[in-house]
Image (cartoon, rainbow, N blue to C red):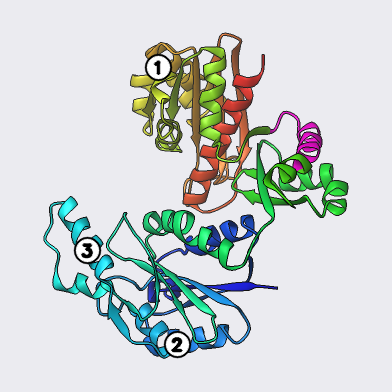
Amino acid sequence: MSSVELVAVGTELLLGQLVDTNTSHIAAALAENGIDCYASHAVGDNRERIAQLVREILERADGIVTTGGLGPTVDDLTKEAVADAFGLDLVLDENALAEIEAFFTSIGRTMRENNRKQAFLPAGSYPLENPHGTAPGFIAFRADGKFAACMPGVPREMKPMLAERLLPWLRSHFSVREGIVTRVLHTVNIGESEIDHRIADLFASSENPKIAVLAHDYRCDVKIMAKAASTASARASIAPLEEELRSRLQGHVFGIDAMTLEGAVLAALDERGESLAVAESCTGGRVAAAITGVPGASRRFLGGIVAYDNAVKQLQLGVPEEILERFGAVSEECALAMARGVRARLGAKIGISTTGIAGPEGGSVEKPVGTLCLAVADARGERAWTLRIRGDRAAIQARATTAALGLLWREVKIP
């Protein structure tokens, strides 16, 4: 069976200075296109080590997909290493050079001589154009037909190159004829273990289509993937399983595929024709940032108030001093006052608030770090909830943001 392995190039990956998101993205794309990936690797910016890794991988795999090391600097050595491993010379690709020159012209900058280096590719390579940057990708071939497909490490350059250039080539090269369809059901307000409990029998009995559950911070994805003689046949085989999953997870599926939680919130607000305002303390504006990241958010989102200090809670949101003194800023009573206040101040149909202790300090026995109070105020009344969230400060703030959006989606969806 044909297979590839993935290599992420960059010393910064080995030092923990950069998180590699490219490998997971490529692996998912390969799986969705019926191409088997058996292993992934990370290697530093060392010509000899990269070349040796390429040789080792091609002892067992049919090809390699790499990211990184295609830039203009002296430590960008991927193509030199691939050329060494394959016994090839680097030759100037005039088309690649012209594209690099055109890129600099388009942004009004002068091309430096070191950028010319990027137009030298291993002899006989199949070029992968890069309209989003200066590093052309390429597919280099060993004498026995095995290959190394190399792409830039910058995700905004790599992702379109993968989708538009490399994946079509790989499907053709490996003669992938099957129709492969993936459907992802996004869920919120339900844990991974509860999902597993509800669908365990389906998970065990479904091979094609098959099911996978992927946990994220305070939400989970249920992924269905099917292979068939055609895309239409694959979709048809997914449909009954998707319907059964939706039934078992009713009330928790907020969207499919590219839909985000914040996008689902805005879609639900559109359905009800209502406006939203947010008051945030511990999330520091993250809820508002998530919502305004969705195109068209201005249809329903009026604005937000980040009331971190108690004085701001009082002055901007009208939180009574008595509540702060009696119950504290991290309390359902304060959260309710914040939601009520932002709804009134901004004239929104719905107000939501977050207040909590993100840590690492500030917790107590009664209210430990990770305590989160949420509230919603709308025409139906006011409701508040208290959650306990685990993690460091960044994780607590991220999870609190997801929790707030999940709560808001549920509340807006309730008739």
Q: Residue at x 67, y 47 (%)?
A: 181
Q: Say whether marks 3 and 1 touch (CB < 8 Å).
A: no
- Between 344 and 132, which is closer to the camera in this rendering? 132
Could you say which disc has been placed on residue 86 in the image?
A: 2
Q: Is residue 226 above or below residue 46?
A: above
Q: Is residue 363 above or below residue 131?
A: above
- Chain-order first, disc 2 or disc 1: 2
On the image, numbered disc 3 is attached to which residue?
98
- The answer to whether residue 395 is left or right of residue 115 is right
Percent x, y of residue 215: 65, 50
**Nearer the camera: disc 2 or disc 3:** 3
**Nearer the camera: disc 3 or disc 1:** 3
Callout 3 secondary element: helix
Percent x, y of residue 36: 65, 67
Q: Quadrant of the C terminus?
A: top right
Q: Say whether marks 2 and 3 touch (CB < 8 Å).
A: no
Q: Quadrant of the N terminus?
A: bottom right
On the image, numbered disc 1 is attached to which residue?
318
Q: Amino acid at mark 2?
A: Phe
Is 286 a magenta residue? no
Callout 2 secondary element: helix
Callout 1 secondary element: loop
Q: Residue at x 34, y 80 (%)?
A: 77
- The answer to whether residue 222 is left or right of residue 33 is right
Q: Which region shows up in magenta?
A: 238-252
